[in-house]
């Protein structure tokens, strides 16, 4: 449900963000835990200026994406 909420927001804004499903992709799960420290989803991986940030919490992710859209 939280993932779907974010997914709908991505589609509504019209962003092209590749999704990864932890249920079918064990490598993605390992990568998420190694990078973000938690296996909770949704999580948005943000690669910017040579560094990577892992943003959890569906509402925070949507707020971040909406801010991008407003720019
Ligand atoms: N408050 C979080 C809740 C996210 C959540 O509960 N995600 C569940 C799946 S729907 C989950 O990843 N649970 C496993 C975990 O926390 O490791 C949000 O809004 O994103």
Image (spheres, rainbow, N blue to C red):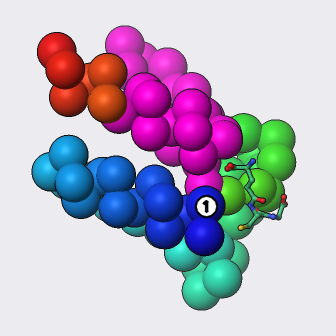
Q: In the figure, is residue 48 to the left or right of 39?
A: left
Q: Quadrant of the N terminus?
A: bottom right
- In the image, 33 versus 7, the foreground residue is 7
Residue 62 position within the rendered picture, expressed as x and y whole percent measured from the top left: 44, 39
Residue at (57, 32) in percent of width and height: 60
Q: Nearer the viewer, residue 36 or 15?
A: 15
Q: Is residue 9 left or right of residue 33?
A: left
Q: Horizontal and vertical percent for residue 8?
A: 35, 62
Residue annotated with mark 1: 2
Q: Is residue 13 left or right of residue 60?
A: left
Q: Is mark 1 within 8 Å of ligand 1?
A: yes
Identified at 20% across, 28% down, the residue is: 69
Q: Position of residue 70 (x, y in %)?
A: 19, 20
The answer to whether residue 42 is above or below residue 1 is above
- Left or right, 5 with reference to 22: left
Does residue 27 appear in this view?
no
Magenta stretch: includes residue 44:
yes
Residue 64 lies within the magenta run: yes
Start and end of the magenta stretch? 42-65
Quadrant of ligand 1 in image = bottom right
- Relative to the observer, which residue lies in front, 28 or 9? 9
């Amino acid at each position: 449900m939280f993932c779907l909420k974010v997914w709908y927001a991505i589609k509504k804004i019209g962003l092209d963000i590749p999704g990864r499903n932890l249920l079918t992709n064990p490598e993605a799960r390992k990568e998420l835990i190694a990078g973000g420290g938690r296996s909770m989803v949704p999580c948005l991986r943000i690669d910017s200026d040579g560094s990577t940030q892992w943003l959890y919490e569906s509402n925070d992710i949507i707020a971040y994406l909406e801010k991008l859209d407003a720019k």
